[in-house]
Image (spheres, rainbow, N blue to C red):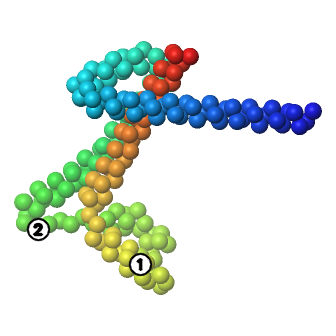
Amino acid sequence: MVQTDKTYDESKRVGEMLGAMEAARLFVLDVLQTCRFVFEKGLTSAYEATRKELKFLFKRFTALDYVFGNLSMLALLLCFMVFLSGFGLLGYQVVDWLQDGVWNAMPLMMVFTFLFDGTAFGAWMQNPESWVGLHQVMEWLLLNTPISLVLIVDGLILTVFMGATIVFAVMVRRFQFKHREQA
């Protein structure tokens, strides 16, 4: 009897895995079909189809979808603000340079000193007694990397990642709604 229950559980798990694999296959086919539609019909037709699909989705979204969607959009906005703050800092440096003729460098060391002042790590950066080669590499990086560059690159990476995450989440929800309608 015990062996039969074990066999039933294993076959149930296998069935669930096969169902998940089929859903993943259908999702990939749906994405490929959408990409083919965009390439064949062009962006104008794709824009109209996207508007119809968004109307379809908005009618079916739950309150939880809207909560997570708004939180995701807020995160996207914050990532974009990091990106823009890098340009803002660079703009400040340029205006300051145009007025005085002296470039006011703002290396990453300024942020490091602010964050780690009074800590063991900060003391090691001031006077290393071991790991001197690592100290030299870190010191060079912190002194030669501008804060604005870090903000711009990190903000851009975070913005693209968050935007892709939102698009993927909407595509998954669309697939779930379409698949539920067809079943």
Q: Which residue is mark 2?
A: 102
Looking at the picture, does residue 9 appear above or below residue 142? above
Q: Quadrant of the N terminus?
A: top right
Give the residue drawn at x 74%, y 31%. 12
Instruction: Name the residue that disc number 1 marks.
Output: 135
State the image coordinates of residue 124 (x, y, percent, origin top left).
Answer: 45, 77
Residue 165: where, in percent of width, then height?
42, 39
Mark 1 Cα shell of 10 Å, populated few (<14), some (14-19), many (≥20): some
Q: Percent from the top left, x then y, of residue 31? A: 41, 32
Q: Amino acid at mark 2?
A: Val
Can the viewer see residue 161 in this picture? yes
Relative horizontal placement of residue 95, taking residue 76 as reference (left or right)? left
Q: Residue at x 67, y 32 (%)?
A: 16
Q: Nearer the viewer, residue 123 or 36?
A: 36
Q: Is residue 72 visible?
A: no
Dot placed on the residue nearer the N-terminal end, 1 or 2: 2
How far is mark 1 from mark 2, CA to CA? 29 Å
The single residue placed furthest to the right in the displayed view is 1
